[in-house]
Image (cartoon, rainbow, N blue to C red):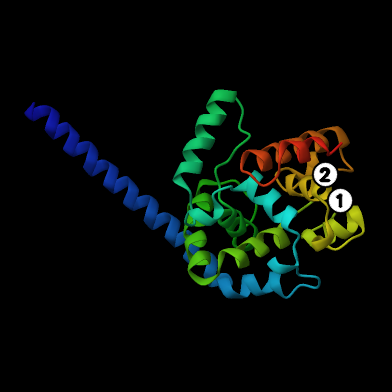
Amino acid sequence: MKLFKKILIIFFILFVIALSLVFIIGFSYYSNTLKEKPLITRVEEVTSKEHFTSFKQLSDDYIHAVIAVEDHRYYNHGPIDPIGIARAFYTNIRDGQFDEGGSTITQQVAKNVVFNQDRTLLRKLGEIFAAYDLEKNYSKDEIFALYVNSSYFGDGYYGIYDASMGYYQKNPKDLTLSEASMLAGVPNAPSVYAPTVNPDLAKKRQKHVLNRMVEYGYITEEQAKSIP
């Protein structure tokens, strides 16, 4: 029994050391990134763009569609969502494919605004610290607006305004449920889900978005089925 306790203590110490190293490395990476350009400057580069669309200028259907498919607990958790990470891990193992990443909308803003798109462990660690910094300085609505204005929607459209005008020739606030659910699914994989790239896959993704909206109570099954 004494040996078992000693082993447990050793493992605990090693775990704390490893966790501390992860913290130090991630924080250092994020701090060095901010030395190149402060967070407030990076955010202002997005908000100062022509046709930046604020939260209030988005349609309710679009807001609900994005939250349902990307981060349905967005307003109920902090910068990261341990429950979402665990759920994504379970789903990916169960389905045998990596369809869910577990990143919150705030983490995706960190990726889009603070870092590049490289999928490295360093970036993922730095992303966590950036997410905490974002939520410390900006509201959930402001972060949501940063997300939809910094996302790529395929066909050369960066940001929801360009995507809405490009695909549907209308302002984001005027998007119908059908249009909103289509655009909400695109940023996950623009090269695959852009409506002009593969209409069949785009519709499949849209159905997934609609099903999530039904699941989380934003629309009824009848509304979802009414979308051709």
Tell me the residue at 39%/50% (across/down). Answer: 22
Horizontal and vertical percent for residue 8?
19, 34
Q: Is residue 64 above or below residue 142?
A: above
> Dot 2 corresponds to which residue?
194
Asked whether residue 135 appears in the rendered view, the answer is yes
Residue 158 versus residue 61: which sits nearer the camera? 61
Label 1 crowd (10 A; few <14 / some 14-19 / many >=20): some
Residue placed farthest to the right in the image?
A: 169
- Residue 31 appears at what percent x and percent y? 47, 66
Residue 207 lies left or right of residue 10; in this view the side is: right
Q: From the top left corner, tell me how far across and down residue 152 is, in percent.
A: 75, 54
**Quadrant of the image for the C terminus?**
top right
Q: Residue at x 72, y 57 (%)?
A: 60
Is residue 206 in sight in this rendering?
no
Q: Nearer the viewer, residue 177 or 39?
A: 177
Q: What residue is pinned by disc 1?
A: 155
Quadrant of image for the N terminus: top left
Q: With respect to residue 3, does 217 lie above or below?
A: below
Secondary element under disc 1, as helix, strand or loop, is: loop
Whole-percent x, y for residue 217 in the image: 63, 44
Q: Are marks 2 and 1 in contact (CB under 8 Å)?
A: yes
Amino acid carrying label 2: it is: Ala
Of 101 and 21, nearer the camera is 101
